[in-house]
Image (spheres, rainbow, N blue to C red):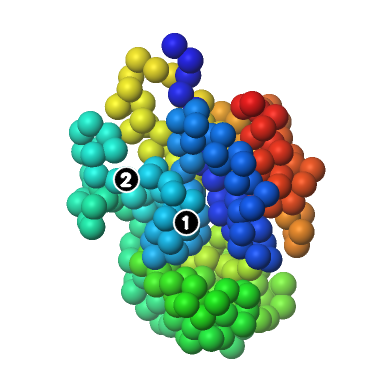
């Protein structure tokens, strides 16, 4: 029997265009994948509220990973048995890998006071400010603010102060991921760990069938998922260089940007 393929994909700048947040150039490939029953699994820095909307738009019924690997959401009964370590929450089996947001907010305010004027966190911004910064609508910015597990910050200071801040936060036990626009302060979770856990659940569910994990991303916060996949696709960004990866085999770089690059590489690999 053919190995089952799983597609883990970043959203912002990868499946969604960096500027328009649209998937248009990938729509035909999404349809092709659905016809072949290949799950498209969002693996994103976005919140539950944001992913639920995108998932409904794209008519995906697959599991997904939110907030940079902080939690995996699996629709109830997607697998024949409920995976170990998951909790039932609004129709999903949820596996979380990270402490909740309040923990990170108190760490930032109590232990990183010297950097206070160098950044602005999502919690300090009104939806309008976040909308201005990202190009999201006010409604969508409101959804982006509903974070459960960490705090993204907009860095206002120098590169040097950012480097110092990242070192300082590491010493405090936090993890700092650089996304396309923000620094994400969170726990020791990443997209790779959550992806590997979820791939393992597919294996447990269908042990007789091998798996090929394909991951697609455009930024530094995608490197863990790209390194952990069987096949890695780095999608070209209009605003930053390709992230640096250790692996050299089964590695693709798109020629096109965002969703067009996403479709270009999956067409080459699968179809
Ligand atoms: Mg991205």
Quadrant housing residue 266? top right
Q: Nearer the viewer, mark 1 or mark 2?
A: 1
Question: Is 87 displayed left or right of 96 in the figure?
Answer: left
Between 271 and 28, the one lying in front of the other is 28
At 43% across and 19% down in the image, what residue appears?
210
Instruction: Check the image and report above or below for 54 versus 226.
Output: below
Q: Quick one: which residue is furthest to the right in this view?
A: 255
At 32% across and 45% down in the image, what residue appears?
74
Of labels 1 and 2, earlier in sequence is: 1
Question: Is 268 displayed left or right of 223 in the figure?
Answer: right
Q: Secondary structure at mark 1?
A: helix
Residue under label 2: 74
Task: Where is residue 187? Give x, y as percent.
Answer: 42, 60
Task: Where is residue 202? Give x, y as percent.
Answer: 36, 30
In the rendered image, is residue 101 in sight?
Answer: yes
Question: Is 119 displayed left or right of 41 in the figure?
Answer: right
Q: How many residues crowd around disc 2 within 10 Å: few (fewer than 14), some, or many (20 or more)?
A: many
At 44% across and 81% down in the image, what residue appears?
123
Instruction: Check the image and report above or below for 136 versus 266.
Output: below
| Distance from the alpha carbon under mark 1 to that under mark 2 | 18 Å
At 47% across and 56% down in the image, what residue appears?
57
Q: Is mark 1 within 8 Å of ligand 1?
A: no
Which part of the image, by quadrant, shows the C terminus?
top right
Task: Where is residue 174? Give x, y as percent.
Answer: 46, 63
Between 52 and 202, the one lying in front of the other is 52
Residue under label 1: 57
Query: Which numbered circle lies on residue 40?
Result: none
Instruction: Check the image and report above or below for 119 versus 144.
Output: below
């Amino acid at each position: 029997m053919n190995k089952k393929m799983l597609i883990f994909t970043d959203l912002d700048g990868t499946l969604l265009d960096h500027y328009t947040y649209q998937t248009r150039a990938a729509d035909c490939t999404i349809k092709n994948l659905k016809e072949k029953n290949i799950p498209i699994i969002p693996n994103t820095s976005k919140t539950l509220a944001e992913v639920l909307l995108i998932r409904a738009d794209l008519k995906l019924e697959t599991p997904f990973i939110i907030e940079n690997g902080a939690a995996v959401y699996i629709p109830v009964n997607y697998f024949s048995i409920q995976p170990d370590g998951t909790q039932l929450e609004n129709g999903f089996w949820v596996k979380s890998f990270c402490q909740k947001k309040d923990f990170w907010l108190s760490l930032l305010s109590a232990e990183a006071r010297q950097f206070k004027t160098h950044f602005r966190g999502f919690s300090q911004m009104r939806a309008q400010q976040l909308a201005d910064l990202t190009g999201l609508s006010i409604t969508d910015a409101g959804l982006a603010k509903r974070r459960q597990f960490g705090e993204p910050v907009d860095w206002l200071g120098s590169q040097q102060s950012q480097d110092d801040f990242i070192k300082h936060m590491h010493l405090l036990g936090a993890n700092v991921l650089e996304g396309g626009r923000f620094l994400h302060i969170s726990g020791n979770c990443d997209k790779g760990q959550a992806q590997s856990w979820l791939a393992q659940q597919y294996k447990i569910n269908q042990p007789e069938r091998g798996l090929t994990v394909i991951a697609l991303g455009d930024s530094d916060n995608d490197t863990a998922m790209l390194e952990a996949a069987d096949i890695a696709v780095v999608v070209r960004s209009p605003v930053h260089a390709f992230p640096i990866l250790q692996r050299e085999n089964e590695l693709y770089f798109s020629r096109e940007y965002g969703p067009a690059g996403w479709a270009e590489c999956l067409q080459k690999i699968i179809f």
